[in-house]
Image (cartoon, grey):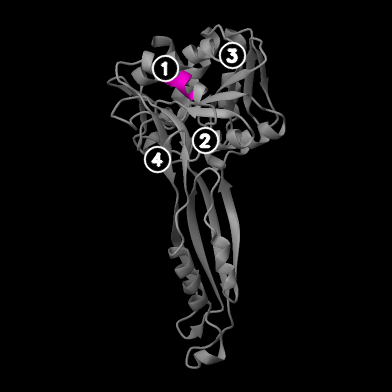
Amino acid sequence: MDALASLTRDLVSIPSHDDESTAGEYIASWLRDHTDARVTRDDHGNVIARKGRGDESLALVGHHDVVPPDESQVDADGEYIVEEREDRLYGRGAADMKGCVAAAMLAFRDADPAGELVFASFVGEEQGGVGCQAAIEDGFAPDYAVVGEGSTGYSAPGTTDVAVAHKGRRGSTIVAEGAAAHASEPEAGANAIYRATDAVDVVRDLDFPETSVLGHEMSGSVAITEIDGGSAWNVIPERCEVTVDERTVPGERAPLDRVEAIEGVTWRVDQDLPPMACGDADFADAVLDAATAAQAATPEHVVKPHATDAGWLAQAGTDCVIVGAAEPGEAHTADESVSLAVVERCRDIYEAVAESWPSE
């Protein structure tokens, strides 16, 4: 526990919201000093290490970038404040997700792997997974992956579960265009806000996408979250934009392009973070067995609501599950923290999976 707490503290203390390079160099140097693995830090800043041999590979995956800290989480010199209280470590990135990066580093060091074992810590996860995407484009393609995002507290408080799927997010914009006119003569123009509200009605009537992953039902959602239109109180608006937040499920998308049947309305996709679904039930069960052995509670296969780098990996052909210490509501907050005991549990799970999977 002392080694893990110290390593986690070191990682959390390194600012990495604007520039991940110092954190990445620390991770790469630690792996070179403490393992005989083949360690690389690519042109994007991702840290990847490999050891063991085999026809199939298992990756322990995390990211070392964080969202910008709250002002209470930095000192006068701009350094991150890290505190330990009652077996919890407080600081930006403790939960999301440097605690589990540290757990994966130690598990990678100590495991006698059943096949090729890969450690990967990516940059840019908080910017839509740009580091993971770049690594995939460069050929990163493990057969299996355990991604260390939060999976604790889903089935019961304090229980570290195994997420076999998560939702994605597609953010898009509906653009309605019309023709300006004086508001005293509305028939002389074409009201873009009216066209936009007609499009909103189409969105409201759409069914949410649904699917099933390893027996777990998943339902997406579609919501209008912003609207912006008009230029003055006495001018018929010639343009209006509507923001749509869609939570996607594997293999399904809401037919938002239907809004383009309305005159003057177009639709564009601004962001599309893919969902994840584990396609190998045996792998999911093997990780659940390791999670069960590591704790007194009885973990379950669960579904996460949030997109992670597991979505990009799954889209590229890697069978993924998610096992991590963070609990719902811990990440991205002014008092972000992580239980060191649960981080230690995750380390045990990662090491057990590495030594048993791929199975013979």
Closer-to-camera residue (205/50): 205
In the image: residue 85, left or right of residue 58: left
Q: Is residue 63 visible?
A: no
Residue drawn at the location 56% of the way across and 91% of the way down: 188
Q: Are marks 4 and 3 in contact (CB under 8 Å)?
A: no
Q: Specify few, some or many for label 4: CA neighbours under 10 Å numbering under 14, 14-19, or 20 or more.
A: few
> What residue type is disc 1 on?
Asp
Say above or below: 121 vs 360: below
- Residue 39's x, y, as percent? 66, 16
Instruction: Please provide the residue range marked out in magenta.
Output: 284-291
| Picture layout, residue 287 above or below residue 151 | above
Amino acid at dot 2: Ala
Q: Do the residues labelled 3 and 1 touch (CB within 8 Å)?
A: no
Q: Mark 2 points at which residue?
A: 277
Between disc 4 and disc 3, whose residue precedes? Answer: 3
Residue 289 got which mark?
Answer: 1
- Residue 222 in the image: x percent, y percent? 45, 56
Q: Nearer the viewer, mark 4 or mark 3?
A: 3
Q: Tell us which disc is closer to us: 4 or 1.
A: 1
- Distance of mark 4 from mark 3, alpha carbons? 32 Å
**Which quarter of the rendered picture does the N terminus lie within?**
top left
- How many angstroms separate mark 4 from mark 2 (CA)? 37 Å
Q: Which residue is drawn at 53% across and 41% down?
A: 275
Secondary structure found at label 2: strand
Q: Earlier in the sequence, mark 3 or mark 2?
A: 3
Residue underneath mark 3: 31
Could you say which is closer to the camera, residue 293 or residue 95? 293
Q: Which of marks 3 and 1 is nearer the N terminus?
A: 3
Q: Kindly identify the residue that appears in the image at 36 percent across and 29 percent down.
A: 337
